[in-house]
Image (cartoon, helix red, strand yellow):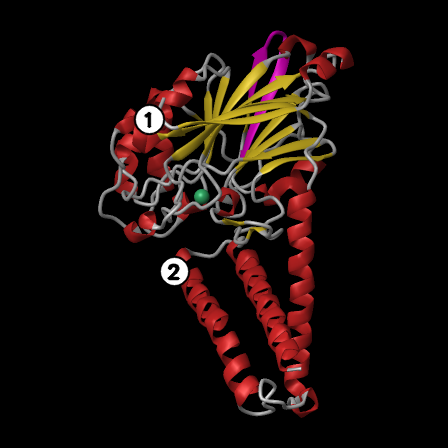
Amino acid sequence: MIWLNLLIFVLLAAGHTELMVTLVNRVHALRIRRETLRHLRHAHDLLLVAFPVVLVGWFGFGGPGLLTGGQWADLPRGWWLYFGLCGMGFVGLLISSLQHLLRPIPKAQITNHSHTIDIATRLGYAPLVDGPYRRMANVPGNEIFQLEVSEKVYRLPQLPQEWDGLSVLHLSDLHFIGTVDRPFFEQVIDIAGDMQADLIVFTGDLLDRQELVSWLPETLGRLSARLGCYFILGNHDWEHGLNPDETRQALSDLGWQDTAGKTVCIEHNGRTLAIGGSECPWMGEHPDFSNLSDDAFRLLLSHTPDNLPWARQQQIDLMLSGHNHGGQVVLPGIGPVYAPSRFGVRYASGVFWEDPTLLYVTRGISGQYPLRLNCRPELTKLILRSPELDLGEATAVGVQTDNQILASV
Ligand SMILES: [Fe+2]
């Protein structure tokens, strides 16, 4: 009976953790400044540690003595309610983990080829300097420099036949904070430039320190594409002490087009590509897609994938997002835990088809915290195929996935 009670304690602690994580994830999706969120996170950390201590100390060995032969009937009534919630939290954790493990890849994805480049090996040293959260970088197994470079092919129902093969390079979440040093980002940009996409987009979270806007000419400023470079900013660019207007101007001066809260139209091979940007809920408003012809292809850059329901209402064909960083720490058998989203970890990263929108969420390049476990930084080129691609060709190409590790390139 004591061992059974100990097992129940473990399940209750897991359920309690899931409840705390669920709350923190949802609150971090809101338009709340980092300083305020920090207090919530401290409370979350305290409660995470305190609950198992209370379980074992108070209910196990004190009070009802459930680890010394006591009875559950002696548990105070108020705790039954919270233990019931913890039980529901544990069931939620199981469902979330199963959804992560069993989530199918949408049929729209035809191929996925990727390789990993160790930027530290490529440079000959780890590009780290003293800065915020520097010690996190020393965690064994940290993958912050293991850049996964991918080419993914998608078949999209609305893509004009004339655009078959159109490519979009998607960068997000550079998070210049100073701990990961500029040479890392310069290497990433070198690799991005070699990928030769038709269109380049950046989906927000550029700066955590405003003065590092000075890194832009040697990073994003070196990229160009025949159909242009487009950007939005993210919640970190909006934080207290940051100046999003200055950041927008700096990127615009380097040839990037700001799409925040508006729709930019490009005529390409006789068809219209409408690119809109949304920084909601942190800045501005959603772009207006209402005055477009029905056959215009609609591309939405949205920092958070939480805007997917709105995107579907607007008949968005392709939505590109970042923000969630893939969770940054992905636990074996459980999946990502933390994602600042009202959907929790559901859209932490990856590709999702929710008719009529294909959503791609990148894990991004970096983060405020220099820690990634089982969750490499990502640089992805999406190659778009039109529905006229016949099934015979699709079968010949097959649904391929590979990942080649290149220690030094
Ligand atoms: Fe971010």
Kindly identify the residue that appears in the image at 71 percent across and 13 percent down.
396
209 is higher (above) or lower (below) than 19: above
Using the rendered view, name the quadrant where residue 209 is placed: top left
Using the rendered view, name the quadrant where residue 217 is placed: top left
- The answer to if 266 sits in the magenta stretch is yes
Report if the CB atoms under discs 1 and 2 are less than 8 Å apart: no
- Kindly identify which residue carries mark 2: 35
- Which x, y percent locates residue 283? 48, 44
Q: Amino acid at mark 1?
A: Gln
Q: Main secondary structure of the magenta part?
A: strand
349 is higher (above) or lower (below) than 339: above
- Which x, y percent locates residue 191? 39, 22
Kindly identify the residue that appears in the image at 76 percent across and 11 percent down.
392
Task: Choose the circle earlier in sequence order: 1 or 2.
Answer: 2
- The answer to if 306 sits in the magenta stretch is no
- Which x, y percent locates residue 332? 55, 49
Where does the magenta region start and end?
A: 265-277
- Kindly identify which residue carries mark 1: 187
Q: Amino acid at mark 2?
A: Glu
